[in-house]
Image (cartoon, rainbow, N blue to C red):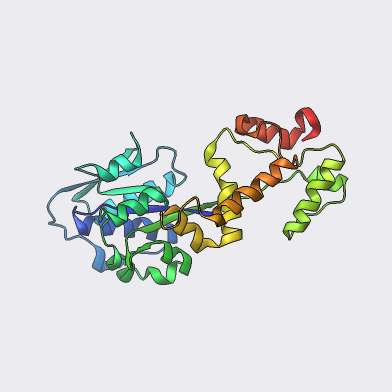
Amino acid sequence: MIHSKIILPIAGRVAIVLTLVALIGTLAACGREPEDEFLFAPDSPPVTLTYVAPNNSLFSSPEQIAIERFQELAPSIQVDRQSYRFNVGDYLMDEQPPDVLLMWNGGQLSSAAYQGLLADVSEVWTQGNFTEAYGRRFRDISRFEGTLRFVPAGFSWSGIYYNKEVFDQFGLEPPDTWEEFIGICDTLLANGITPMSLAGQNSFISIYWFEYLNMRLNGPEFHRDLIEGRVDFLDQRVAEVWELWKSLLDRGYFVERPGSTSEMNSMTALIRGDGDRR
């Protein structure tokens, strides 16, 4: 499952500065050199660009390289890089928002786009030839009502990890189908091993299960419609996702009290088999 992180220009600010920062940041990640047409004239008036991003950004090193490269190309423009001090939604709704935000794709982004709070960056995509640099799915999630509103800056992925030693002990292989997955869980249970650990204390991790099952059962388009409010969470198709996930809990596939299990305890349960040989 892929989660995208985006560069988000805010509407109503200095458009040329916004687009160039997004452009330079993406080109740095792609290893491409910017075209001369994107350079600022040496006598451009001084400008300070406010850029807000998470303090623990996974892109801190390439981000700094991109900022330095940009300021080499446009020495009259200073980038005021700030860390988040409050919720991203507050930045989006502020009367004086930052020029650029680095944030995760999600419901707050969709709401801001529909309220007209995001700048149109279609010109950046065209001039930077980004349609060749990005796959179709990345292009699709960057559009709102047919208009490109942000530039993807990176992505992360999530998956299910398994204890290879335990799998080898019982002659198991990573499953290719849902039926094989259920068979592995049943085999482990029959041998006194709790099949899965879940760090439910962190709701952000727990929601991965819902997202994955929903996209597998109902498709990615349905999932996007759901998180953007076009489908009600009381929809029967959503109920089927909860029922499937609950069935895994009811069968005893997860550790006891997963809702109070921390990330560290969940990880040690997988690696060391603490307690009941999880």
| Residue 175 x %, y % | 75, 56
Task: Pick the residue in front: 228 or 191.
Answer: 228
From the image, which quarter does the C terminus lie in? top right
Query: On the picture, is 270 further left or further right than 83?
Result: right
Query: On the picture, is 170 further left or further right than 141?
Result: right
| Residue 77 x %, y % | 21, 50
Q: Residue furthest top?
A: 275
Residue 81 in view here: no
Residue 48 in view here: yes
Tally of numbered tags? 0
| Residue 259 x %, y % | 61, 33
Q: Identify the image quadrant of residue 121.
A: bottom left
Q: Identify the image quadrant of residue 143.
A: bottom left
Q: Residue at x 23, y 42 (%)?
A: 94
From the image, which quarter does the N terminus lie in? bottom right
Q: Identify the image quadrant of residue 30.
A: bottom left
Query: On the picture, is 191 further left or further right than 164?
Result: right
| Residue 217 x %, y % | 61, 59
Q: Residue at x 23, y 62 (%)?
A: 39
Q: Residue at x 38, y 68 (%)?
A: 130
